[in-house]
Image (tube, grey):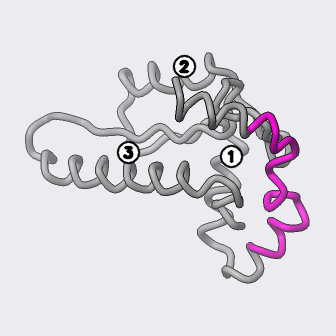
Amino acid sequence: MAPYPPGLATYCASKQAVLGFTEAMRLEHRDSGIRFSAVLPTFTRTELIAGTRAPLGLLADPEDVAAAVAALIARPRRRVTVTRAAGVLATFNKLTPHPLGEYIARRLGVHTTFVDREARRVYDDRLRNP
């Protein structure tokens, strides 16, 4: 399934950068006792998702993300996905041939993430001109 919805290129690029950085730090410091974890939330009810809708109803609350971070203190892991359904879809994505994944993503509406371009424009403008 396509993990990169159209209209989110900057977000997707920065997320890939953070994942690469986290993995490199984890490997560089593997013998130091320091643990590195990546938290991968789905669409979360914050202003970041202005003008979007969560594909398949995948929507997390900020408290869900906070709970996942707190759980990593007790049980460190390399990656944790918020929500469970988002994790299942991410795993499915890794196991699915690319053309089939894109077809399924189109059928599920992942490629039509943005439903209110004006709301998204207002959010983006505010970020560019605080």
Give me the C-alpha separation between circle 3 and circle 1.
16 Å
Quadrant in which the N terminus is drawn:
bottom right
User: Disc 2 on helix, strand or loop?
Assistant: helix
Q: Which residue is mark 3?
A: 78
Segment colored magenta = 102-120
* Amino acid at the residue labelled 1: Ala
- Residue 64 picture quarter: top right
Position of 31 relative to 91 (above/below): above
Name the residue at 74% across, 32% down: 50
Q: Is 79 or 25 nearer to us in this picture? A: 25
Give me the C-alpha separation between circle 1 and circle 2.
16 Å
Q: Is 89 or 54 nearer to us in this picture? A: 54
Task: Point out residue 130 in the picture as x, y percentages from the top left corner.
Answer: 52, 23
Give me the C-alpha separation between circle 2 and circle 3.
16 Å
- Marks 3/1 in contact by CB < 8 Å: the verdict is no
Looking at the image, tell me whether mark 2 or mark 3 is earlier in sequence order. Answer: 2
Residue 67's label in the rendered image is: 2
Residue 86's label in the rendered image is: 1
Name the residue at 91% across, 66% down: 107
Task: Point out residue 56 in the picture as x, y percentages from the top left corner.
Answer: 85, 47
Residue sitting at the far right: 107
Residue sitting at the far left: 32
